[in-house]
Image: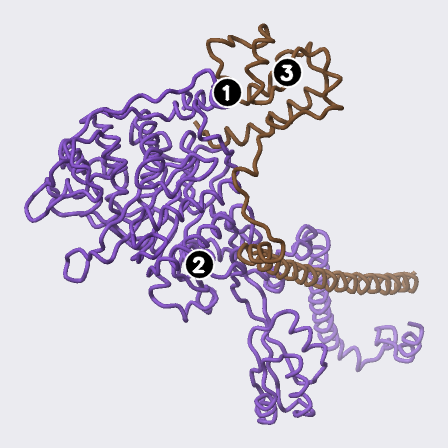
Chain colours: A brown, B purple
Amino acid sequence: MSRGLSLIALLLLAAVSFGLYQLSYEVQRLEEELIEMNRALSQERETIGVLQAEWSYLSRPEYLQDKAQRLLQMRPATAKDIVAIEALPWRQDRGQPMSNMPAPALPPMAAAPAAAPAQPAAVPAAPPAPVVPPVQVAAKPEAAPAQANDFDAEVAAVLGAMQRPGNDKRRAP
Amino acid sequence: MALLRRQLKPKPPCTPADIPGSPALVRLEGAAKQALDASRGRLVIGIGLFSLAFILLAGRLVELTVLRGAAEPVVARGVNPELIAKTALMERQSIVDRSGNILATNLKIASLYADPRKVLNPSEAATRLAQALPELATGEVQAKLISGKSFVWLKRGLTPREQYEVNRLGIPGLYFHNEQRRVYPQGPLAVHVLGYTDIDGKGISGVEQYFDEQLRDPSRTGDPLELSIDLRVQHVVRDEVARAVEAFNAIGGGGIVLDVHTGEVIAMVSLPDFDPAEPGTASKDARFNRITLGVYEMGSTMKTLNTAMALDYGTVKLNGGYDATHPIQISRFTIKDDHAKKRWLSVPEIFMYSSNIGSAKMAVDVGPERQREFMQRMGMLNKPTIELPEVGGPLVPRNWKTVETMTIAFGHGLSVTPLQLATATAAIVNGGVLHPPTLVKRPLGLPAPGRQVIRRDISDTMRKLMLLVVEEGTGKKAEVDGYLVGGKTGSSEKVNDRGGYNKKANFNTFVAGFPMHNPRYIVQVMVDEPKGNKSTYGFATAGWTAAPAAGRIISRIAPLLGVPPVDESSPALKQAMYVPIPGQPLPNFSNPNVTITGRTQEKKLASQ
């Protein structure tokens, strides 16, 4: 009885100490791994920092301007190089299917006076206040959904999205 | 165990059964019993002590494994201060521009040192080192390596590539010491905004000093300071101001671009400047921030404020005017016009021909008290608030009487920082709201702080008047194709050492807003003491020096800033921005040709 108990106790002791050592080594290994990972992480961050600084250095405007002017014969953009998206002509192949439309759904700026009288119902109060801001002009097909096909709606959405930030972003109340 | 038993068996414990009937033992019984009792007592104490120790150990085990289980992740999460110290790399946060381009950052750089006693072959090591690091002289390195000391610096601040090259040599006895260094990849581009740090990485100028605590805060790692500066605009302004300074052989210059709706400073340039990496080599003049620290008599650019003031108080109507035939004599001053017309001038004419006489009379009608109150309202009498330590306070006259009122009307007698003029002009064109200037990017969508300082309709009128200056007045050279630019020139004589005015030394300013039908930005250019040249027929006034630079800046930055160009000759736009000048016939706006472009602009104006 006493002998058996001692044996069991000894076996338990051996097992527990083995387990403890095992655990202790495992923890040690994990800790080393953690330190190693943190070290690698910080090294990566450092590398990223260096690369970002280098990128910033190599893309500094002064340097790019010199290269662009000397090697690519580029010049600063002027107002003449910028065209409003409304002023662009429609592509012929995409423009054709809109035969059910009385006029271009998204009138180019210059064509607008002709288009406005052609849609008397859709445009609210055209003659007394022909001063529709561009955003509203772009949104016209949405106001007349029966006439607009999917393509127009899509274009209108894109145009609306492009114009709104430019015009209204800074108009904080 | 068995072995233990066998050893124990030959020595049985002394029991009462072994000694029955022994008289000696009986006699001794008392003493033996005593001894036995004593030893048994001691044994119990021993057992108790050991049990206690084991119970303590067991308890500790239970505490460590079961109860303190939740404490384990402390290490795994890396909140361990020791680990943080090991992994912390950016001791100081980066500074970036409004689109995230790095303006200042901390890099860990290695410095190379040697332990000469451990270098096996000094001459060979020196030769190879000199090959890897060309700026090192072989002889010098060799002398250091045979010195027999235990520590010599070979090179401070190696680039990662150089460090790699040195490592590749595999020379024993060479070591690296890691250091943090503040790096400004953009060089001198925004140096007066950024400032610089001392050798210990402490900000001692610019936003580096103003935000020093925030930049050092370790809890903000990876959270850079976002400035309102736009790197591209900053470069354009510096480029063009430098061009003007060089062309007119000026002693310095400056430029500001301000967002009129938020007060954000998009660019701030003060020339001459210097490389923040080497602030020690910079002259005092180069370190001086002319935009926020320098105070100047801003000259005729103050007429923008003066005209807005008179119109806002209603002391004169837009179609009113003053007689500017004769110069004004008051105390020791003679106020005369540079571009004298010698006749009655209407308010728009006074502004566009920059008449000192007319402006002075306009201010006298408002009166010294109300003028002072207005200047206070426009922020001209207090130190401007901006996130820089280098801020100069205005020089306000102690006696503010009629003479001072007259001279302040055309920008003399009140010295302010160029930043204050830009801020006030922004308020005049943006609908009358004064936004405090800031160098920190404002969050999108939140309304910028500000207060209404002049009426909205006065602001609309002032925009038209400023447009007139560029179209027909002193600022013609600032015209830009595709953008409605309005502005005001100012050429003031600088005060000389004797307290008088120096006719040869001008401080030229051009303050412009664009596009004037829907203002977005203020561009202000200063040229300090320009000298006329052949291209300007010897003239050195603002209209010839600062205005063309401002025009070039606008033509380059407007496309970058996404300002849509307009057809500035469109009749509708002309009509919308028309200012009636008494005595001039109403121009014929060809109405039938009005395009939708023009109409939308008109609507925009009406809605502002």
Q: Are marks 3 and 1 on the same chain?
A: no
Q: Are dots 1 and 2 in contact, CB under 8 Å?
A: no
B280 over A172 or under it: above or below: below
Q: Which residue is mark 3?
A: A142
Image quadrant occupied by the N terminus of chain A: bottom right
Most foreground residue, B466 or B111: B466
The chain letter under disc 2 is B
Q: Label 2: which residue?
A: B191
Q: Residue furthest left?
A: B331
Q: Earlier in the sequence, mark 1 or mark 2?
A: 2
**Closer to the eye: label 1 or 2:** 1
The label shown at residue B501 is none
Chain holding disc 1: B
Q: Residues within 10 Å of mark 1 (few under 14, many from 20)?
A: some
- Which residue shows up at 33% across the image and 45% down it? B510
Task: State how far apart marks 3 and 1 are (Cα).
Answer: 24 Å
Q: Which residue is mark 1?
A: B595
Q: Which element is circle 2 on?
A: helix
Residue at 62 percent across and 20 percent down: it is: A106
From what the image shows, is residue B389 above or below residue B517? Answer: below
Find residue A8 and report its horizontal and vertical position in percent. Answer: 89, 61
Spatial CA distance of label 2 from label 3 is 50 Å
For disc 2, the neighbor class at 10 Å (few under 14, some 14 to 19, many from 20) is many
Q: Decide if residue B338 is on the left or right side of residue B575.
A: left
